[in-house]
Image (cartoon, rainbow, N blue to C red):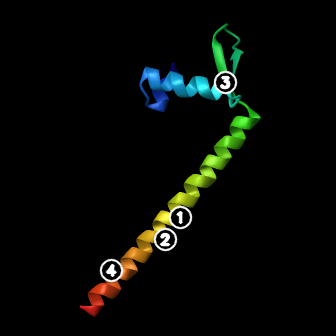
Amino acid sequence: MRIMYKSNLNFDRFNKHFNHLVTKGFIEEMNGPNGRKVYKTTELGKTLLEVLKKAQQLISSETKEKGTMAASAESVHTAAI
């Protein structure tokens, strides 16, 4: 349940996505020492996280570059007026 609360998704959406991650092997279910279910990120899941972080960085840097280009274009446009 803690995972669901931290995901900031409602119950149905969380279950859909979480079950997909388990089914695809990104997360594995284990039995904890107190008999409760415990979930662990697999090596495949860690690889997915790395790829997603790189994609986020790429998108973020492209957005910043576009913002810089837009600001430069705006200043050129303003100077021309």
Report x, y in % for residue 61: 53, 64
Question: Which comes sooner in the sequence, label 2 or label 4?
Answer: 2
Rate crowding at label 1 as few (under 14), some (14 to 19) or many (20 or more) other CA atoms within 10 Å: few
* Residue at image point 32% right, 80% down: 74
Secondary structure found at label 4: helix
* Disc nearer the start of the sequence (4/3): 3
Indicate the amino acid at tag 2: Glu
Question: From the viewer's perspective, is 47 left or right of 57?
Answer: right
Q: Mark 1 or mark 3, which has the lower sequence index? A: 3
Marks 4 and 1, how far apart in space?
A: 20 Å
Estimate the x, y position of residue 31 in percent, counting from the top left: 70, 12
For mark 1, what is the residue? 61
**Does 74 appear above or below 57?**
below
* Distance Cα–Cα, label 4 vs label 3: 49 Å
| Mark 4 or 3: the one toward you | 3
Answer with mark 4 or mark 1, whichever residue precedes in sequence.
Answer: 1
Farthest residue in the right direction?
Answer: 43
Are dots 2 and 1 in contact, CB under 8 Å?
Answer: yes
How packed mark 3 is, by other alpha carbons closer than 10 Å (few <14, some 14-19, many 20 or more), is few
Q: Residue at x 57, y 26 (%)?
A: 18
Relative to residue 39, is residue 37 depicted above or below? above
CA separation in Å, label 1 and label 3 = 33 Å
Kindly identify which residue carries mark 3. Answer: 23
Q: Which residue is mark 2?
A: 65
Local SS, label 1: helix
Q: Position of residue 62 (x, y in %)?
A: 51, 65
Residue type highlighted by circle 3: Thr
Look at mark 4 in the image and give the residue it sits on: 74
Residue 48 is marked as none
Closer to the eye: label 3 or 2: 3
- Alpha carbon separation for disc pair 3 and 2: 38 Å
